[in-house]
Amino acid sequence: MRRILAFLLGLWPVLTIASVHPVELHQRLALSGAPGENVVALTLDACDGAFDAGVVRFLVERRIPATVFATRKWLERNPEGTAILKRHADLFDIEDHGANHVPAVIGEGRRVYGISGNPDVEHLREEVSQGAEAIEEATGLKPRWYRGATALYDPQAIEDIEAMGYRIAGFSLNVDAGATLSKAEIVARIRMARNGDILIAHMNKPRSDTAEGLAEGLKELQAKGFRFVLLRDETVVSTGGRASRSLAV
Ligand SMILES: [Zn+2]
């Protein structure tokens, strides 16, 4: 019996670690608009890679605002794109997506979608604060929102990021699945948008179908009378989360 107990106690740390699965946070806008009015928020991640000028050109033409989550890496690699976003500061609010696009999971060897997380809490805090510093340097404005790479979070990471004073930005409608979907699939997903939805898409993969899909899908929403808002101007409420067991170790 004692041996069995010792064995189980020995296993305990492993079981505890294995039970921590990162969570995808789901949120919506808490709207107090006129009845029948449809309001949604578009969020765009600029993870690393390039600048999808097609996405931004369309949004400027149609006067559609978007909350952009940019990494330090992306800002440094894309000065031209950064300048265009800044030139349209009324439309684009740049928020924190971390310094190096490291997912908000904590622990040696932990990964999400094959991307390594933070070995410890200190690294997580650096990822968040150095991303924020880069945005402040580029725009003169301190970010208030944080979205981690891959949009998955350990519960401990959520606590730490919030303790640093940031709101964590979830979403309710994943429009382009990391800029991997076809134009038709993106349009189909955007057609599912309802009042209060927070849409997530990407603006760092110009070779993807995202720009074309967004253009067609968002044009349809505008034609239906949908209004677009920035996260910073709205009250955002949590609608739960989904543990992503298969995507992370
Ligand atoms: Zn990202």
Image (cartoon, rainbow, N blue to C red):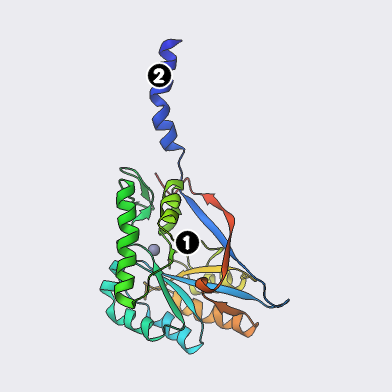
For marks 2 and 1, give the one nearer the viewer. Answer: 1
Q: Quadrant of residue 179?
A: bottom left
Question: Which residue occupies the extreme left position in the image?
Answer: 76
Location of mark 2 (residue):
7
Q: Is residue 228 above or below residue 194?
A: below
Q: Residue at x 58, y 71 (%)?
A: 188
- 48 sits left or right of 192 in the view: left
Q: Residue at x 35, y 45 (%)?
A: 110
Distance from disc 2 to disc 1, alpha carbons, whole Å, reads 42 Å
Q: Residue at x 30, y 62 (%)?
A: 130
Q: Residue at x 45, y 50 (%)?
A: 159
Mark 2 element type: helix
Q: Amino acid at mark 1?
A: Arg
Query: Looking at the image, do the residues carrying marks 2 and 1 touch, with CB atoms under 8 Å apart?
Result: no
Q: Sequence order check: which comes first, mark 2 or mark 1? A: 2
Q: Amino acid at mark 2?
A: Phe
Ligand 1, by image quadrant, is bottom left
Q: Camera-side residue: 204 or 168? A: 168
Mark 1 element type: strand
Some atom of ligand 1 lies within 8 Å of the CB belonging to the residue at label 1: no
Q: Indicate the position of residue 228 as horizontal and vertical percent values.
A: 56, 78
Location of mark 1 (residue):
167
Badge 2 local density, few (<14 within 10 Å), some, or many (20+)? few
